[in-house]
Image: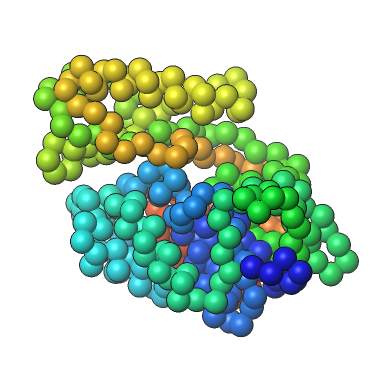
Amino acid sequence: MNIDKTYDYIIYSAGLAGVLTAIELSNKGQSVLLLNFYGFLGGSITESLNCNQFINGNNLDGSVKIIFDKIKKANHGILYHAAKEFLFNPETIKIILQQELENSKVDLLFHIVPFYLKQKKDCVEVSLTGKEGIFNIKGKTIIDASDEYDLLKLENAKRSLININYNLFLTALKDDEWQSYSLIEKKIQLNNDRFWISLKLPHPENEFFIENNSQKIINEFEELVHESGGRLQLIPSQSQKIFGIEKKKISDRIFHINSLLNENLNHKKIFITCSELEIKFKMTL
């Protein structure tokens, strides 16, 4: 990354949509900087273990299909498959997306939190904090590809919280008593007595306390799992929060990737929506 450079595009964050958009723009000869809060890629699939996806492989095309095919060919890339329903291994997603970016000319910067946007005459200055400290970078166009509209929030776009889910993996259960837990929205049984579970969490009065409330519920659920002879095998970096927003575009220079679509990216059909998105940004960007 060159902090003195004015990039053609700065994209935050590095979910599937952000990665694909960054690679597509880079392949067109644009200079692209991709930013991410965590030190790995994948968005909600890896950060929140939103691994349960619905895909019609015949409807995928371009880079999305290439990535999907690589996941299917990888050892243990698919943990569950029934008809058009898949459960992905989040570690496989991380590895394949990292490989795709390493084969591109996209600049990538991890462990970054954007905290201020300033529109100037010929660019947008983005203020960031990260391991490198606090610094500014410039981009001609800023694309918010985050699941939670993080950049648009900096421009005072009003978000509304729709759903909160906490997704996790369980293992080695001796009985089914834990399945009586009232917040279980969905469960998928894998091999070796493992399960992928999605808990639907209540909304706190203040959005600031989402993760604190989530932890209390997970502690309660973990006790029930232990009583059934199991354990939490894998928990997410954060809960999966689904927001709506009043405005998806601030200006021609600052917009959310959803503004290119007729509907928002579907959190259950990320690959399908990204395939549609790929067609859209080939025509518009």
Q: Give the percent coordinates (x, y) of residue 160.
A: 62, 35
Figure check: 173 above or below 32: above
**Residue situated in front as seen by the camera: 170 or 183:** 170
**In the image, 182: left or right of 121?**
left
Q: Residue at x 64, y 68 (%)?
A: 1
Coloring scheme of the render?
A: rainbow
Residue 53, can we see it?
Answer: no
Q: How many marks?
A: 0
Quarter of the image holding residue 178? top left
Q: Residue at x 21, y 61 (%)?
A: 75
Task: Give the position of the C terminus as an image quadrant.
Answer: bottom right
Figure check: 203 above or below 233: above
Q: Give the percent coordinates (x, y) of residue 113.
A: 64, 48
Quarter of the image holding residue 197? top left
**Residue situated in front as seen by the camera: 214 or 127:** 127
Q: Give the percent coordinates (x, y) of residue 25.
A: 58, 75
**Residue situated in front as seen by the camera: 149 or 239:** 239
Figure check: 171 above or below 11: above
Q: Residue at x 36, y 61 (%)?
A: 95
Q: Residue at x 64, y 50 (%)?
A: 130
Q: Give the percent coordinates (x, y) of residue 69.
A: 29, 69
Which residue reaches farthest right? Answer: 121
